[in-house]
Amino acid sequence: MSQNSLVLYTFNYAEEEEQLCKLEVRSLFHANLHAFVLESSINIDPSRSPFIKEKIDVLFTCATLDDLLQKVQAMPSLNSTFKVIGINYRDVDQRDKMEFEERKAIARQVGSLIPGVANLHHPEVVFAITKLKGKWYFGFYSENQGIWHIHQQKPHNYSTALTTRVARALVNIAVPELTGVTVIDPCCGIGTVLVEALSMGVNITGSDYNPLVMKGIRNNLAHFGLSGPVRLRDIRDITEMYDVAIIDMPYNLCSVVSDKEKLEMLQCARHFSKKMVVVTTEDIDGILNEVGFKIVDRCEVTKGKFIRQIIVCC
């Protein structure tokens, strides 16, 4: 994550994912998402998020198209092949919308002024031009590679496990800054969160008390060429300190974790982590307060009638 003059992000989410997307945005960008487009000075890889569709690293913003064309013409010569695309945002003001042929014509006009070699089929660099709130924007374009889609094909899975989309958002909520942060998933199950975290370069340790899942976890990681510490141990045996804990509270249709067990689990988490993001299907606010966690943000994720709460604590 780095600071830039301006970056435009486009988001895409289903209705049942809206709360999760907006919690992720608050965590990553320290901003509220009111539409499907976000302007930010924080620059991240769009593939980190399951909800970012594309981004423009803005080079120029201008009040008129003519002004922008002048700036484009003054760009230094490119050493890479390029193409230019025009973008419409789905919820922009009607005055900002460009019809398909207009977008193509403007993209061609801009492309003709860039000092370099155009390549429409296999460009090394893609530029984008768009209009938002009456202003013109031009910059480097990149889109989400959908890495989590690949991770859906894990060799081992649980029917009650988090989806890869939720797991990836969960990691972003827990670890907005990837460097210098130690993370633990002490109830890692089959490793859904571990796969997403390790694929982003997060320094994460996984552990679980169930010996039957250890082989499955390691096979899942190896399947995607990932590696990280995974330990067979009870949450009560964790002694080292971590910056963040990500805990998906055990959920099973055939068994119920008692309030006493929940209390003990969260007491342990309070001892070994400074911050926690917890996923739960039940109301645990009282237990969180009892063990000394402060709830700082939250959302609900629905799947049919099944509701999970994601709670950020410190």
Image (cartoon, rainbow, N blue to C red):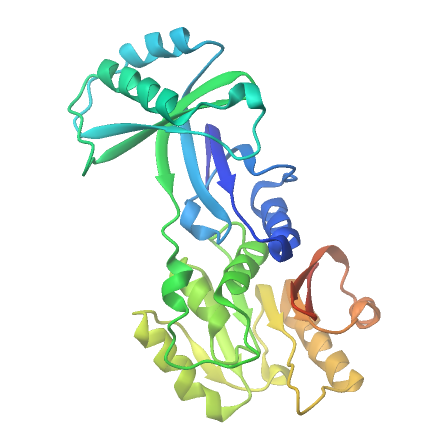
> Which residue lies at the image location 34% right of the left edge and 69% below the top edge?
226
Q: Is residue 6 above or below residue 235?
A: above
Q: Is residue 240 left or right of residue 108?
A: right
In the rendered image, residue 218, in percent from the top left (x then y), is placed at: 38, 81
In the rendered image, residue 59, in percent from the top left (x then y), is placed at: 39, 22
Of residue 16 and residue 39, the one placed in the foreground of this image is: 16
Of residue 68 and residue 90, the one placed in the foreground of this image is: 90
Of residue 95 and residue 143, the one placed in the foreground of this image is: 95
In the rendered image, residue 39, in percent from the top left (x then y), is placed at: 54, 31
Of residue 199 and residue 3, the one placed in the foreground of this image is: 199
> Which residue lies at the image location 41% right of the left edge and 57% below the top edge?
200
Total marks in image: 0
Quarter placement of the C terminus: bottom right
In the rendered image, residue 273, in percent from the top left (x then y), is placed at: 63, 66
Q: Is residue 219 left or right of residue 207?
A: left
Quarter location, residue 77? top left
Q: Is residue 223 left or right of residue 209?
A: left
Q: Is residue 267 above or below residue 123?
A: below
> Which residue lies at the image location 64% right of the left edge and 63% below the top edge?
277
Quarter location, residue 149? bottom left
> Which residue lies at the image location 34% right of the left edge and 11% below the top edge?
69
